[in-house]
Amino acid sequence: DIYMLFLLKTELKHGDIVMNNQSIIFLAIITVMIHFNSSTLLAMEKQKASKSATKIVPEATTGDSSTLKLDKMKPGKNWFLRFTLGAGYGQVNNSVNAVQSLETGNKYHRNLTGTLSTEYQWGKYLGMEAEGYYGVGSSPSITDVIATSGTLSTKDRKIATYGILADVQMRYPLTRFKRDWGFHAGVGYGMMGVKRTNPVREAVTVDSSTFKVPGFFGTLGVEFRLIPEIAMGADFALAFATSPSLKNTTGSTDTASATFNSGSFSRIRVNANYIWDAQFRFGMEYARRAISASPNSANVIQRDVMNQFYATITTIL
């Protein structure tokens, strides 16, 4: 460029246009500015490309090893552990309960509840899950009418809900409609129960009453990414082979027990989570759990429905 400017100064002359010293200086300034701006823009583009290449995206994965992009495998491993801890509020509805109490149908009992679940996945298709929950609270004050004497008795009543379920799952991940999906189906064994302290009974004094339903169950579920920052999931579990029992005690004495022809339990869970990063997310979960027993020879029917609402935190190891 300097050489060209020298030529312009010494040799160029076209018509009435003559390159003088002022023109040479002006062209030199323009040339330097053009070179400076070009170098600056090139450096900025290189820096931007470098940042884009090294940017860490929270939902990044190691490939086909994970069920969803938010499930990050350890480097060099084809498995992961996912823990979810939840705490919240629950209600229990005893709709029909001929032996356990004389509670009014559709009367909800309040309790605080917590849950802990663990998921393990090996490879792309095999997984396991274990979930436990426990809730405790007081029941509404109900006046017990004792039929033999006609007297009224108001009792301090408490209620506890508990359960544990574990299953083995087959999982299938896929991408459809520009979203990541994870489906699973499995079988397992579990138990759900409700224990009442000082339940309302007619003509019988009972300190505690425990109704529980253990047995085998099947489960189906789905998990998907609604938007890059929001993951949602739902699953359903239903027992198919159970042995329900009802036990009433006074002190350490088994006051009365009931046997049932058959029974069942079920669980519906729906959750939504905000993806904080590749290893943590925060969310909400609703769980509806129900335990029931079919009539026996004495036409006894037993059923409890639990509605539970949790705030949750999940971590992936």
Image: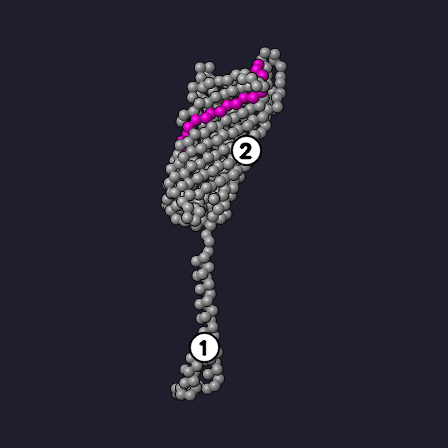
Q: Which residues are magenta?
A: 202-219
Residue 193: x, y in percent? Answer: 50, 26
Classify mark 1: helix, strand or loop: helix
Q: Residue at horizontal 41%, vertical 46%?
A: 77
Q: Which residue does the image show at 51% across and 36% down from the upper left?
A: 116
* Placement of the N terminus among the 4 image quadrants: bottom left
**Magenta stretch: dominant secondary structure:** strand
Q: Is residue 116 visible?
A: yes
- Indicate whether 242 appears above or below 7: above
* Label 2 to label 1: alpha-carbon separation: 75 Å
> Magenta segment: does it hold 173?
no
For badge 1, the amino acid type reads: Thr
Instruction: Identify residue for label 2.
Output: 113
Q: Nearer the viewer, mark 2 or mark 1?
A: 2
- Please say whether residue 238 is visible from this viewpoint: no
Q: Position of residue 82 (x, y in %)?
A: 47, 41
Image height check: is 16 above or below 93? below
The x, y position of residue 300, in whole percent, is 47, 18
1 displayed left or right of 194: left
Q: Residue furthest front?
A: 76
Answer whether labels 2 and 1 touch (C-beta < 8 Å). no
Dot 2, how many residues are within 10 Å of its Cα: few (below 14), some (14-19), or many (20+)?
A: many
> Which numbered tag is attached to residue 31?
1
